[in-house]
Amino acid sequence: MSQLEKIYGVHAVEALLRHHPKRVKQIWLAEGRSEPRLQNLIALAGENRVPVGNAERRELDAWVEGVHQGVVAEVSPSQVWGEAMLDELLDRTEGAPLLLVLDGVTDPHNLGACLRSADAAGALAVIVPKDKSATLTPTVRKVACGAAEVIPLVAVTNLARSLEKLKQRGLWVVGTAGEAEQSLYQQDMTGPTILIMGAEGSGMRRLTRDLCDYLVHLPMSGSVSSLNVSVATGVCLFEAQRQRSVKAAGSAKKS
């Protein structure tokens, strides 16, 4: 059991069962829990021949840090992809890809929320530096509500070099910066786009910023000067998704 990870939360465990059932070795449920969503999870576990056991809630509390919702799964170790995965994804992708880069986001809650938004907005993958960045953990999976099992998280050794390679493949790099003159809503993101979000507090590193083709800011109308990085990421991703939907609808009308 020492080589297994503990993943918790109904959505995270259900997503693993749907997308990577072979990774799930055992599911534990808190004694006395019998609501419908747990019955659905038990049925899904049965379809994939994953054993389900019961444990006292205090045992589950001791196993994980966070709100487990009465569900803990023991699974094989997380998969973080290498840079080669980017080429594979781009080679088999039709249309204009959208990639999200998190330049040094270290809070696992922020990473989990960004993965969730990236999946919902149709991003191809999320890219992070190998060093000084959050990676897949049970907390990230719980916050991501299943997205961590669907959208690839790619860790690269040298982010600047990876961005240069992606630019050579025809992708445009859009970075976010509070001092940028151009608004997010003025930026065309319907083509092959890499969206870069900076770290909590410090923003993008200089080398990353220098590789951006465009810099944009989020217009702020209230008294606060900035948003949490995961919230800002969601705003930017869904603006890209909105633009792409409008373009696709226009193309459909013309045809």
Image: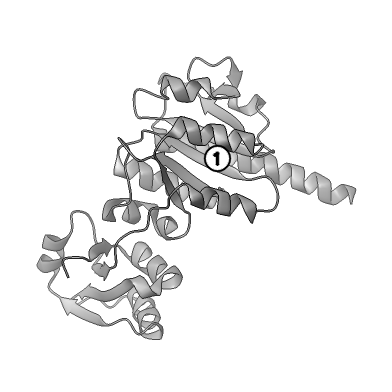
On the rendered structure, is 202 left or right of 26? right
Amino acid at dot 1: Leu
Dot 1 lies on which element? helix
Q: Position of residue 30 (x, y in %)?
A: 19, 73
Residue 219 found in image quarter: top right
Q: Position of residue 140 (x, y in %)?
A: 32, 51
Looking at this rendering, what residue extends furthest in the right direction?
Answer: 255
Q: Position of residue 124 (x, y in %)?
A: 56, 50
For the point 58% across and 30% down, the residue is 173
Depth check, front residue: 82 or 78: 82
For the point 41% across and 69% down, the residue is 20
On the rendered structure, is 225 left or right of 172? left
Give the colour scheme shown: one colour
Disc tally is: 1
Dot 1, how many residues are within 10 Å of its Cα: few (below 14), some (14-19), or many (20+)? many
Residue 4 found in image quarter: bottom left
For the point 45% across and 42% down, the residue is 127
Depth check, front residue: 138 or 230: 138
Q: Would you place residue 248 above or below residue 159 in this image?
A: below
Q: Would you place residue 188 above or below residue 113 in this image?
A: above
Q: Would you place residue 150 above or below residue 123 in this image?
A: below
Q: Position of residue 230 (x, y in %)?
A: 41, 38
Q: Is residue 75 visible?
A: yes
Depth check, front residue: 93 or 186: 93
On the rendered structure, is 159 left or right of 191? left
**Quarter placement of the N terminus:** bottom left
Q: Is residue 171 visible?
A: no
Quickly name the residue at label 1.
237
Residue 19 found in image quarter: bottom left
